[in-house]
């Protein structure tokens, strides 16, 4: 058997990314645009993107930042709406007709960064919105963790499946659902076996690392994200899901930039920055189990199939050539620390 040294695949898409706003947006959008054709852009700004009008305006700010920092880029941002207890069916229809909104994001209130305005009880308050989404074919993108303080942090995804996901999908069986940033064996089993139109995104950090990374030789704030890294058995289940050929699993980096000082403080922010080197990280994970042949389906095909979009027509090429992750990135006035900074990866992008 010869060792694969180059890999050319249709340009991948990132089905879950945080691009932020203002100067951070300008600093990071070029990284995502350099690797990906499209990206589902999360709406957890302050204030959150809760209306179609706000989504259209944010879409334009992203394009402006792109034209300023990566002129000529063909990157296409796909927008999302932030679901609240008060989202109306009319707002969902406006979003669906806006031409820029591709999903509606469910954040259980308090589950992650900027989720304070999120939903407190989805089945109680969001019925009309979910009904309208089901009718319009607009997918529900789910941060699948309960926030009940009596539930252990590491069990929040598994408990969410029983308490929220199963009853919600029973009530809205035709609703398209993405279980975002899946992190557990229970999540993999549920998404693999559930009936109906369901998919899941998987991040590079949850494929490559387990929770030991957060505590290795000291407290490592740059390895802290939500949902938090889990035990090794969960990582192995995620790798099997991503590389196993099921069309339900696709790429979503959850790249979530926070400036260095906001991560390295007494209450550090959650989020890993991976937009710079996303495909290099995924290639590392697939190569580690000898399944580089599955990277194309996971990164370039399964996501478009779920969202009913065409596969990108251009390509990227990865080469087995060492890539050293920079210690930090000076982006305008900001300093960002990329995930796994200082480490070496086996694959680089040669044509992007
Ligand atoms: N997780 N950080 C953020 C969002 C995600 O739950 C997420 O999607 C963020 O900073 O916006 C994080 O750790
Ligand atoms: Zn989330
Ligand atoms: Zn996210």
Image (spheres, helix red, strand yellow):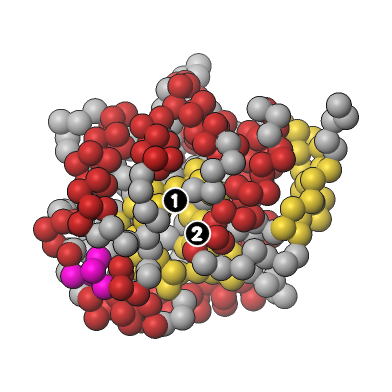
Residue 153 sits above or below residue 109 on the image? above
Residue that carries the numbered disc 1 in the rendered image: 199
Q: Characterize the local packing of mark 1: few (<14), some (14-19) or many (20 or more) Cα atoms within 10 angstroms.
A: many
In the image, 236 versus 302, the foreground residue is: 302
Residue 77 sits above or below residue 256 on the image? below
Q: Give x and y (percent) for residue 116.
A: 23, 54
Q: Which mark is residue 156?
A: none
| Magenta residues, start to end | 128-132
Residue at the farthest left position:
124
- Label located before the other in sequence (1 or 2): 1
Q: Give x and y (percent) for residue 312.
A: 67, 65
Circle 1: element type = strand
Residue 133 is a magenta residue:
no
Q: Can you tell which quarter of the image residue 131 is in?
A: bottom left
In-image side of 85 versus 22 (left or right): left
Residue that carries the numbered disc 2 in the rendered image: 306
Q: Give x and y (percent) for residue 41.
A: 47, 63
Residue drawn at x 11%, y 58% as measured from the top left: 124
In the image, 9 versus 76, the foreground residue is: 9
Residue 129 is a magenta residue:
yes
Q: Characterize the local packing of mark 2: few (<14), some (14-19) or many (20 or more) Cα atoms within 10 angstroms.
A: many
Q: Main secondary structure of the magenta part?
A: helix
Q: Can residue 219 be seen?
A: no
């Amino acid at each position: 058997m010869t060792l694969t040294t180059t890999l050319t695949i249709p340009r991948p898409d990132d089905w879950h990314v945080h691009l932020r706003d203002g100067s951070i947006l300008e600093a990071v959008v070029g990284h995502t645009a350099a690797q990906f054709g499209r990206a589902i852009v999360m709406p957890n700004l302050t204030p959150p993107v809760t209306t179609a009008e706000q989504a259209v305006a944010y879409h334009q700010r992203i394009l402006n930042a792109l034209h300023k920092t990566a002129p000529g880029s063909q990157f296409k941002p796909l927008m999302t709406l932030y679901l609240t207890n008060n989202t109306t069916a009319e707002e969902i229809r406006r979003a669906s007709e806006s031409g820029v909104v591709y999903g509606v994001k469910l954040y259980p209130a308090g589950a992650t960064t900027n989720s304070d305005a999120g939903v407190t009880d989805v089945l109680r308050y969001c019925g009309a919105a979910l009904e309208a989404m089901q009718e319009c074919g607009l997918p529900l993108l789910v941060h699948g963790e309960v926030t009940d303080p009596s539930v252990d942090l590491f069990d929040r995804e598994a408990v969410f499946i029983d308490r929220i996901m199963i009853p919600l999908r029973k009530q809205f069986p035709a609703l398209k659902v993405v279980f975002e940033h899946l992190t557990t064996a229970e999540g993999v089993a549920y998404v693999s076996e559930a009936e109906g139109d369901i998919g899941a995104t998987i991040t590079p950090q949850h494929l490559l690392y387990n929770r030991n990374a957060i505590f290795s030789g000291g407290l490592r704030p740059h390895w802290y994200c939500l949902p938090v890294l889990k035990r090794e058995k969960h990582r192995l289940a995620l790798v099997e899901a991503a590389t196993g050929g099921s069309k339900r699993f696709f790429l979503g980096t959850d790249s979530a930039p926070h400036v260095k000082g906001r991560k390295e403080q007494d209450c550090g922010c959650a989020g890993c920055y991976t937009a710079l080197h996303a495909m290099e990280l995924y290639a590392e994970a697939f190569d580690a189990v000898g399944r580089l042949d599955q990277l194309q389906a996971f990164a370039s095909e399964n996501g478009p199939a779920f969202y009913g979009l065409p596969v990108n027509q251009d390509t990227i090429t990865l080469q087995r050539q060492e890539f050293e992750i920079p210690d930090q990135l000076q982006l305008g006035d900001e300093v960002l620390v990329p995930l796994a900074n200082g480490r070496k990866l086996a694959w680089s992008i040669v044509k992007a």
